[in-house]
Amino acid sequence: MNTKQIRQKILDLAIRGELVRQDSTDEPASVLLERIRTEKEQLIKDKKLKRDKKDNEPIDEVPFELPEGWEWCRLGDIANISMGQSPKGETVMRNSNGIEFHQGKIYFTDKYIDKSPFFTSEPTKITSNSVLLCVRAPVGEVNLVNREVCIGRGLCAIEPLGNISIDFCFFWLILLKDYFNENSTGSTFSSISGEIIRNAFIPLPPLAEQHRIAQKVERLLTIVDTIEQLQEELKALVKQARNQVLNYAIAGKLTHQDPNEEPAEELLKRIGKTTATDTPYEKLPKGWAWCRLGDITKTIATKPYQILQSEIEKNGDFPVISQSANYIEGFSSDETKVLKVEDFIIVFGDHTRVVKYIDFDFIVGADGVKVILPNNNLSKYLYYLILNASYKIENRGYSRHFQLLQKEFFPLPPLQEQHRIVQKIETYFSFLDTIENSL
């Protein structure tokens, strides 16, 4: 379920008048606009507001038809718009003296802006009870403020006039994000001007309907929030289930043991190894053996097959595999860097602990990629073995982790049982994938 699209649809229905019923007894928006014009004239007369050259200018082409009682207008027709102005740097400090200061969206939340630890003793643009709009990258983000704050050049304050619902204004401005981005300028960072903001088209409903719309949107978005929370909880449960499947697999609890199968000790002997000494206390199923990674694999030096990050392209003849979470980082057509894969290999991210099963020719991207080649007569079970170990080794941030992996003990089952375990793991994982993809 794509909750982002659901949110978008709710807001789109709201501003088209399709979310709540229209009431013919509501005072039409045209009357509200007349009151706002009168209010603006008084503010201009009192020199609290400058006259906009496009004030009351008719809109020739409207984006879509509105319900009866609604009116198209420009944002500047119905709101006092104040572009932020940063105070002098030396007046901004981390204390509670003066007015709370916001330069950009760093303290934005889902709706109401959080408190800033910065205050200014010489405030410039002060606003309260308004919608704050980011006018510099990232352009178009909005939040509400319900207290007195000072805003810098990264923000502008939109204060609705005529008792217009600030919540309705907030929801409509969310939908204007694409418009603001399309009309932004700047090579170093994008920004929008006050003129772009003032000229944004607004579908204005009757005042009473604005409040009905805002209440309905709030209720519906709260439901979407709940859905998202449940989705995250389900994703966490799916992750736990995957880990449990792997834990059962390497403990021999996922499939049956067959006493007639060749034991793992014989498999180790064939590759010139013996059961690891100083093994853990956990008892293994009959026929299994403890070993270390170096007993059953070897690592391949990656330098001959490695290209620079800057050399990775979007298209090419060969996939590039790195240690990032992306299964394929990109592509390259450099045949001299191709690592040939006969059966399969395992890629381990030395910094990231990401594990990948690779059964095709590829090129190595950037540093930190450990290529693990299994010895003969080993199955894909090795991949799941390493994957499970990667979850358990200590996360040391961007430090190296492969040395920790090499110290781990690995439980090795008979070869035939390895195949049964892999089949069982992938059956469970396929089911969990279906659940996760439906969220």
Image (tube, grey):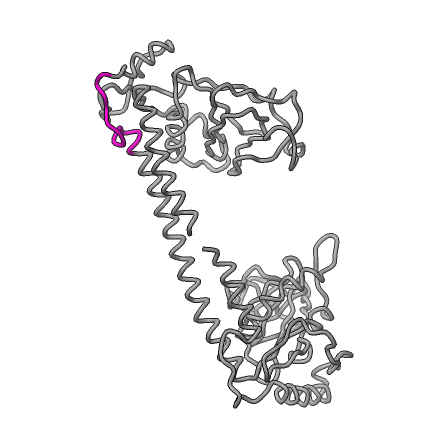
Choose top left, top right, bottom left or bottom right for residue 138.
bottom right
When asked about the image quadrant of residue 414, the answer is top left
Q: Is residue 224 left or right of residue 126?
A: left
Would you identify the image quadrant in which residue 338 lies? top right
Question: Is 172 above or below relative to 141?
Answer: below
Q: Is residue 53 magenta?
A: no
Q: Is residue 254 part of the magenta span, yes or no? A: yes
- Which residue range is magenta in the image? 248-260
Residue drawn where x is 31% and y is 17% of the image:
276
Which residue is rendered at x = 43% and y = 47% of the image?
437
Foreground of the two, 231 or 275: 231
- Left or right? Give the position of 337 relative to 354: right
Mainly helix, strand or loop, the magenta region? loop
Viewer-closest of 8 and 116: 8
Q: On the picture, is 390 further left or further right than 313? A: left
Look at the picture and state if 432 lies above or below 123.
above
At a point 64% along the width and 89% down the height, the residue shown is: 35
Is 89 drawn above or below residue 210 in the view shown? above
Residue at point 73%, 52% (across, down):
188
Q: Position of residue 150 (x, y in %)?
A: 61, 70
Q: Residue 373, position in %: x, y?
A: 47, 20
| Quadrant holding the N terminus | bottom left
Left or right, residue 100 beside residue 273:
right
Q: Position of residue 32 (x, y in %)?
A: 61, 87
Q: Position of residue 282 (x, y in %)?
A: 24, 27
